[in-house]
Image (cartoon, grey):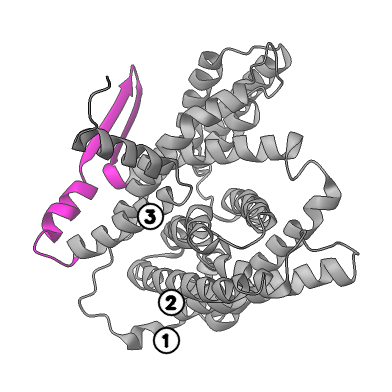
């Protein structure tokens, strides 16, 4: 006779089911972002700031990396996030939604429009300020975890192909974000470090070409590559991308190293790295801010880029793909539903915060707080708009 189920059994089962939800990661990030804002504007603000500036050091011989917690999060932990993104892009390019070019045309065009139009809106508003114009890429980003969270909340009754479209578009969006970081947010290059990094990339390529399937050599070289890229002046997260691209994807004896490491790393990224990033970066001091600050050029450009530019760009370029390039909408999907998905693409949050930190570190001080105001408001409005439109579209399915 089995023993009766107690509270802890039920709680454990409930927690397991929650962690399996695709929307769970976004909900956890939403909680940590809200917590950061609350703590930043409470008597605990001093403790919050002290935590962010808590120094951490990694040293091996003469190689020394010393950073505060918020930079370890933004430079090292986000390199792991981009490592995962690279693995996802490689898998989709080989066997997924990006493998068939005809299927990839629609989300690729949507992603392109969702980058070009928000950037133009932002630049139009901030064209007279050279420092502020550095933030042109901030409203071009899409936070895939938050977007999928909202879609998951209203997804019942909607075609499953909508999720595939959104995920593919967001993956392409992330790929473009990587290119933007590499080319536009790099300064003070060290050619000695770049040369060593180049040699390490050659080692990764050699490991891949030799058919090495053990993960340890790739990860060891990847960590050393991260240090070299960090010292080179190029943003260190690119080391994660490069390492991920060389992880073997071929299946042998029913085993793919890429799939194995992707499945292993995904929960850590979803439930630790991204929530910690949100907690570290979303803390906006509200004292001295008012609704009047929303119409300052930087937050206004970001907010309009996310709320107006993203859906307008995604829909316009998607329409070009359908009516000019002879692509077709996903099976069972209507233009109303596409409008809701296009609005969800305006949830920039994590990626926008990340790019904003790079942009205004390069462009100079004075924009950090108000750019976050635009990101948070723009992402929130986009989420609400997307939810409302998709709910109305769901009733028509």
Q: Are marks 1 and 2 in contact (CB under 8 Å)?
A: yes
Residue range in magenta is 41-70
The residue that label 2 is drawn on is 299
Of residue 51 and residue 125, the one placed in the foreground of this image is 51
Residue 33: horizontal and vertical position, in percent?
32, 58
Mark earlier in primary sequence (1, 3): 3
Tell me if mark 2 has few (under 14), some (14-19) or many (20+) residues whose alpha carbon lies within 10 angstroms of its own.
many
Label 1, label 2: how far apart the Cα atoms are: 7 Å
- Say which of marks 1 and 3 sits in front: 3
Q: Does the magenta run of residues contain 60?
A: yes
List the residue tagged with mark 1. Answer: 295
* Quadrant in the picture for residue 268: top left
Count the marks: how many? 3
Left-right relation of 269 to 208: left
Asked whether 395 or 170 is in front, the reply is 395
The quadrant in which the N terminus is found is: top left
SS category of the residue bearing label 3: helix
> Badge 1, how many Cα within 10 Å: few under 14, some, many 20+?
few
* Residue lying at 43% horizontally and 71% vertically, measured from the top left: 380
Sequence-first disc among 2 and 3: 3
Q: Is residue 150 left or right of residue 88?
A: left
Q: Which mark is residue 27?
A: 3
Q: Residue 146 shows which numbered tag?
A: none
**Which of the 4 image quarters holds residue 30?**
bottom left
């Amino acid at each position: 006779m089995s023993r009766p189920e107690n509270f802890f059994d039920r709680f454990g089962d409930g927690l397991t089911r929650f962690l399996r939800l695709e929307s769970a990661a976004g909900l956890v990030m939403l909680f940590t972002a809200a917590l950061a804002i609350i703590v930043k504007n409470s008597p605990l603000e001093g403790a919050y700031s002290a935590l962010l500036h808590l120094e951490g050091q990694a040293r091996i011989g003469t190689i020394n990396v010393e950073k505060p917690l918020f930079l370890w999060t933004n430079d090292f932990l986000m390199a792991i996030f981009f490592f995962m993104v690279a693995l996802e892009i490689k898998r989709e390019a080989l066997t997924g939604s990006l493998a068939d070019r005809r299927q990839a045309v629609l989300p690729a065009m949507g992603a392109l429009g969702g980058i070009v139009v928000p950037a133009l809106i932002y630049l139009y508003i901030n064209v007279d300020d050279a420092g502020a114009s550095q933030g042109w890429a901030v409203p071009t980003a899409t936070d895939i975890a938050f977007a999928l969270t909202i879609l998951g909340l209203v997804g019942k009754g909607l075609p499953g192909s909508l999720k595939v479209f959104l995920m593919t578009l967001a993956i392409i969006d992330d790929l473009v974000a990587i290119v933007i970081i590499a080319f536009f947010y790099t300064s003070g290059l060290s050619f000695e470090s770049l040369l060593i990094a180049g040699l390490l990339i050659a080692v990764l390529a050699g490991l891949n070409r030799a058919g090495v399937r053990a993960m340890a050599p790739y990860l060891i070289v990847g960590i050393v590559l991260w240090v070299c890229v960090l010292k080179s002046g190029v943003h260190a997260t690119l080391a994660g991308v490069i390492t991920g691209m060389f992880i073997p994807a071929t299946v042998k004896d029913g085993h793919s190293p890429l799939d194995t490491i992707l499945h292993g790393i995904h929960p850590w990224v979803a439930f630790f790295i991204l929530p910690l990033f949100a907690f570290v970066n979303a803390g906006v001091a509200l004292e001295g801010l008012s609704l009047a600050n929303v119409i300052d050029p930087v937050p206004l450009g970001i907010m309009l880029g996310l709320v107006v530019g993203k859906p307008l760009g995604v829909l316009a370029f998607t329409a070009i793909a359908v009516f000019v390039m002879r692509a077709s909408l996903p099976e069972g999907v209507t233009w109303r539903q596409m409008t809701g998905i296009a609005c969800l693409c305006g949830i920039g949050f994590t990626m926008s915060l990340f790019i904003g930190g790079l942009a205004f570190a390069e462009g100079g001080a004075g924009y950090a707080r108000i750019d976050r105001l635009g990101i948070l408001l723009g992402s929130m409005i986009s989420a609400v708009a997307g939810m409302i439109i998709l709910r109305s579209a769901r009733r028509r399915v």
